[in-house]
Image (cartoon, rainbow, N blue to C red):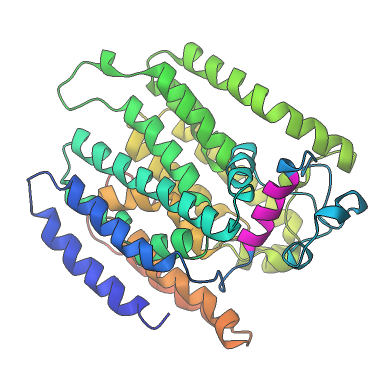
Amino acid sequence: MTLIGPAFLWLAVAARRLEAVRAPLGGAVLAGALLLRLPLLPIPPTLSDDVLRSLWDGKVATAGFNPYALAPAAGELASLRDETGRAVPHAQQPTVLPPLSIAAFSIAARLPDTILAWKTLATGLDLLACGLLIKLARRSGLPEGRAVWYAWNPLVALETAGMGHSESLAAAAVLGCLLCLTVPRGAPALGKRPWSAAVWGAAAVLASPMPLAAVPMWGRQSGHPLRMLGAIAVLLTAAAFPMLAATWAATGGLPLFLRLPGPAAWDGPLAWPLARLAGTTAAALVLGALALAASVRAAFDDDPIAGTGRLFATLLLLAPVFHPWSVIAVLPFAALARQPAWLALSALALLLYLPRCLGVALLPWTFLAVWLPFAALLLRPAPKPSWSIA
């Protein structure tokens, strides 16, 4: 953690210099991203135990059981429990991971060193996201050097190659969808590929819930909304129906992954103060209404990149729960737009690990240390990129 500050200063200097280079930089950016991630692969995931639970869910699925119906503590899974299995968090709750994430973790669960195998796979997906972001910058007429704000970002490398979080899977799928919906400047709109965009878009939703809000916007921007939305609906139904049926039967109603977290878990930038002022029920209604309004507004946005970035940024601020790795969903768009507030948040968010590292409760000080500087940057009276939410 002591190297994080100098690493972000180095990133700012390197990014500024590379943005001025108009020559192709894709190979150099990807090579730098790989070199940044390789040293992090062997380190243990000490800042978060999420990867242990995710790999357990993959192991359960690989063994032929349904992780959406059986919690880790279920008696039917006793034969699978080893030392790692007994240490997984939330042992009384079935998985909340989307189907594509379960499939990815199932691949790693079949290999000898599951944690290293998964972190290697996650790093590969992250490098894929970096490559797609470089292509998206090129197609949008932006300097390829802007991609380093994501590709060389210490938070992204730490959370994927270091801690093994799966956000890179959704990031790659979202960027793949946007690449199919974006045509070079001056090129005809016929260059869009709605069928390919539908496959990438469905993969994004199956990897993370957030992209679901962008599907109507992507469908309209494809030029063939009925065709693209129909294809996404078929793919989602085929992949998600077994999950929905299993969780509905296991819980007797609303699936666990659609339920709101308990009051103690509310730590989102707007949810934390709102829940304490008005209560979690009122806060959920207000935040839900705002999220729905943001999704409806986004459906009429004409720019795939700007519209998606603005929508994801809004939804992240409205989410009841915030983790440092949550920023990865917005960082590709912050990189292309060089949005100071969100780029700074990728560094500030790591302060949320201090209570875990120091073993002491630091709320509300860590909350204020992260969100006050972010708000000051977001609201400052200066020219902002077209997708800024302020």
Per the image, is 349 magenta? no
Tell me where residue 213 appears, x and y as whole percent. 54, 35
Residue 232 found in image quarter: top right
Tell me where residue 11 appears, x and y as whole percent. 24, 67
Tell me where residue 151 appears, x and y as whole percent. 31, 55
> Is residue 98 depicted above or below 215 in this figure?
below
Q: Residue at x 30, y 71 (%)?
A: 8
Can the viewer see residue 42?
yes
Q: Residue at x 42, y 27 (%)?
A: 300
Determine whether, in the image, residue 337 is placed left or right of residue 88.
left
Determine whether, in the image, residue 83 is placed left or right of residue 332.
right
Q: Nearer the viewer, residue 283 or 149?
A: 149
Q: Nearer the viewer, residue 337 or 73?
A: 73
Can the viewer see residue 217?
no
> Is residue 73 depicted above or below 235 in this figure?
below
Tell me where residue 136 appears, x and y as whole percent. 27, 37
Q: Residue at x 43, y 37 (%)?
A: 174
Q: Residue at x 29, y 28 (%)?
A: 182
> Is residue 48 depicted above or below 164 in this figure?
below
Q: Nearer the viewer, residue 239 or 174?
A: 239
Q: Quadrant of the N terminus?
A: bottom left
Residue 346 found in image quarter: bottom left
Main SS, magenta residues: helix
Q: Which residues are magenta?
A: 50-60
Determine whether, in the image, residue 240 is placed left or right of residue 70.
left
Residue situated furthest front in the rendering: 112
